[in-house]
Amino acid sequence: MRAVLLAAGEGRRLRPYFNRPKPLARLLGLTLIERNILSLRECGIKDFIIITGCYSTELKDYLGNGEKFGVSLNYLHNPDWEKGNGMSAYTFRKDYHKHEKFVLLMSDHVFELDLLKNFIKEAENIKQDELLLAADSQLEKVYDIDECTKVKFEGNYAVKLGKRLNDYNAVDCGLFIGTGALLDALSRSIERGAYALTDAVNLMAELGKVKLHFVKNNWVDVDDYHSYKHAEKILLKSLIPAKDGFISRVFNRRFSIRITRLLASTSVTPNQMTLLSFLITAVAAVSFAMAKPLLGGLLAQLASVLDGVDGEISRLKFLKSSFGEVFDSILDRYGDYLIVAGMVYSWYHATGDSMALLVGAAALTGMPMSMVFKEKFRNALGKPFIPEIHDGIMRYFPANRDGRLFIIMLGGILNLLPATLILLAIGTHLQTFIRLYNLRKAA
């Protein structure tokens, strides 16, 4: 499919806060229209039509032909953009291919990526005389509902839409799968002097041709500064993956998300953050070896927090790469080795007890097992290992990397390195055996 992005309006309510067209207002390091282009690219869409109007030159100059985004961008200009967004949508008729289905959305809306993915999957179920509309029936969660276009629906089909509709049970998310039927409805609506996209959608709704897809993820129409800040919150919250361990979810993310927010507008890359996290881990290891456990523990925890930032920046700015994923995993393993080696050296140097070497070896063999198990689980079953789902009560046991570094921090603060290493050795192997047992039982 191709995607049609409406970017013709003036964006007057947001303009006082940003000295550029609204689609080019930056949100956490990317412009609003960039974020939609890259989100749709993640859904497999590579061909885009941008409908311009008020700021045609600015948009073309900034976006270019799409090469820098790995997509193809073409432009259609709507000289009558002031009449309404229906005129902008109807401009697409100039490039429409017969029997084509296309994604139509507003360039200033922000959607969680999973919302777009789930919506686009429904395209194959839409008939050529229908329109698919993303609708949100979770009204208590809708942001600034007074400004939303309301939808009255029965079953899975819209009956009527309108901004001032009093009897409604959902709202329009500004996201469509269109067909030639929508362009025909726009033609009829415009002939009557009704220029809003909603006017054409209502013509189709009267015929029972507006099918609804009810969204479960977050979205927002960035219409003013307050909705802009709400969009920022939505995006930051969406960065927390389901596979997070307990410590990462309840502790680390409170700090890493704030750091990511500060770094989003800079040119810092995920791989640079991965390297920084590793270097801090190395300094933590040296601190332990030099009998400075307090500093070592605090640095280990800082490295753990920063270890989450690289992934957050990657997801936020669509910078994910296969190399980056492998690079992060390799440096994490080296970092774990260095920290344990530093702790073992400190214990052995202070006491001469060979038990330090045995416990250190047990900890070193156990610490990579969490990652190994998750990778093998994903490869064998074709789905990610989610501690919240698959670990049961053991999800609270701090044996994942975030939990191990948290234990190391506590061990450094309390100066209990032998006990910390023993706990790491026992905990990592125990977690592995329990996961194996649970997998065997479920098989």
Image (cartoon, grey):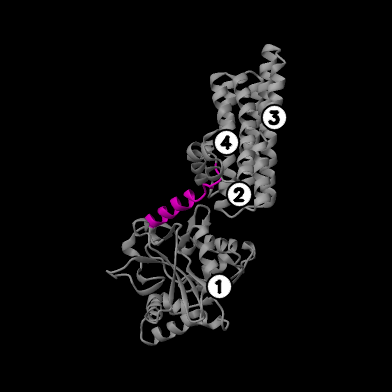
Circle 3 residue:
364
Q: Main secondary structure of the magenta part?
A: helix
Please name whichever residue, 103 or 367, is drawn nearer the observer in this view of the structure: 367
Of badges 4 and 2, nearer the viewer stands 2
Please give the range of residues in magenta. 225-244
Looking at the rendered structure, the secondary structure element under dot 4 is helix
Q: Callout 4: 10 Å neighbours few (<14), some, many (20+)?
A: many
> x, y (%) of residue 336?
66, 32
Between the residue at mark 3 and the residue at mark 1, the CA separation in whole angstroms equals: 50 Å
Residue 237 within the magenta-colored segment of the rendering: yes
Q: Is residue 27 above or below residue 422?
A: below
Please name whichever residue, 332 or 168, is drawn nearer the observer in this view of the structure: 168
Residue 92 seen anywhere in this rendered image of the structure: yes
Please name whichever residue, 362 or 329, is drawn nearer the observer in this view of the structure: 362
Mark 3: amino acid: Leu
Circle 4 residue:
402
> x, y (%) of residue 125?
53, 73
Looking at the rendered structure, the secondary structure element under dot 2 is loop
Mark sitting earlier along the chain (4/2): 2
Between the residue at mark 4 and the residue at mark 2, the CA separation in whole angstroms equals: 18 Å
Mark sitting earlier along the chain (2/3): 3
- Residue 251, numbered label: none
Mark 1: amino acid: Glu
Between the residue at mark 1 and the residue at mark 2, the CA separation in whole angstroms equals: 27 Å
Q: Callout 2: 10 Å neighbours few (<14), some, many (20+)?
A: some
Mark 2: amino acid: Pro
